[in-house]
Amino acid sequence: MTEEEIKQITKLHKSYIPTGFLSTLPDRFLFELYSYIEKSPYGLLYIEKKENRVIGFVSGTTDIKKLYLGFIFKKGLKVACLLLPYLLNRETLFKLFETVSYPVRSKSKAVKGSLPKAELLSIVVHRDAQRKGYGQSLFYRLKGGFKEKGIRNFKVVVGANNFSARRFYEKMGGELLQEIEVHRGVRSVIYRFNT
Ligand SMILES: CC(C)(COP(=O)(O)OP(=O)(O)OC[C@H]1O[C@@H](n2cnc3c(N)ncnc32)[C@H](O)[C@@H]1OP(=O)(O)O)[C@@H](O)C(=O)NCCC(=O)NCCS
């Protein structure tokens, strides 16, 4: 993927997933994260383009812990410099802890069997292109990518109040597993999919 395409992915993420913790961090951080997801053996990233513009993307991981560890190992110093001003803020530090620790917390509360390690991390389609099947097409490409890697099921965590995304995941065959709090006072739900 080109640098320009990753920049456009970053922009879409910031505009369409504004309530997520990652959107509060600098653009450069998200850019580094998506660049890493594309290259990592634990990451998957697909885009949809129209007239040379990225109109949608989907990202996923086969193992979020290994993905984050690899990211810190490969880009730790660069990312630490970018985040330093933010990390001095106690609230941001706490949110960062909540974000990286949620896989463990959600696992301990898992109700219907164990949670899949693999995860759809983000999916966005530009407003002008929504309800035209691009989301479904991106979703199926990710699903195919997981299948090729031998992954049999994966999950997604989505804001409990993000009703349009929830309808989308339900249409994609998601099974509602449980409700969790990734961040204090903010409800999220987890869906599971088979590949
Ligand atoms: C979720 C999202 C990616 C769906 O993309 P999309 O291209 O519009 O989805 P599709 O056109 O492929 O829709 C497939 C089906 O999902 C369901 N669906 C999609 N958007 C919906 C909405 N807003 N309301 C109700 N159902 C919806 C419909 O059943 C739809 O089929 P239909 O149009 O034949 O009825 C898009 O709405 C989006 O970018 N949302 C903002 C970002 C976000 O919240 N992402 C999820 C959290 S990471």
Image (tube, rainbow, N blue to C red):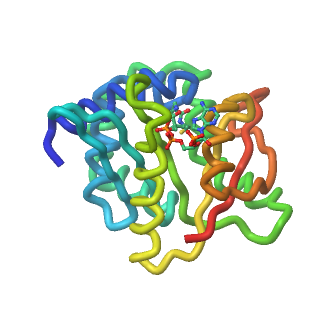
Q: The C terminus lies in which quarter of the figure?
A: bottom right
* Residue projecting furthest to the front: 132
Residue 110 placement, left or right of 97: right
- Residue 80 seen in the figure: no
Compared to residue 134, the image places residue 71 above or below, namely below
Residue 185 occupies quadrant = top right
Pinpoint residue 45: horizontal percent, then vertical percent. Answer: 34, 53
Compared to residue 166, the image places residue 195 above or below, namely below
Pinpoint residue 137: horizontal percent, then vertical percent. Answer: 42, 52
In the image, 11 versus 40, the foreground residue is 11
Residue for point 45% across, 55% down: 60
In the image, 74 versus 155, the foreground residue is 155
Residue 180 occupies quadrant = top right
Q: How many marks?
A: 0
Pinpoint residue 25: horizontal percent, then vertical percent. Answer: 43, 25
Residue for point 47% across, 42% down: 123
In the image, 43 versus 172, the foreground residue is 172
Residue 175 placement, left or right of 47: right
Residue 175 placement, left or right of 67: right
Residue for point 30% across, 46% down: 47
Residue for point 51% across, 59% down: 65
- Residue 6 seen in the figure: yes
In the image, 56 versus 61, the foreground residue is 56
Pinpoint residue 162: horizontal percent, then vertical percent. Answer: 67, 30
Residue 189 placement, left or right of 50: right
Q: Quadrant of ligand 1?
A: top right
Residue 183 occupies quadrant = top right
* Residue projecting furthest to the right: 111
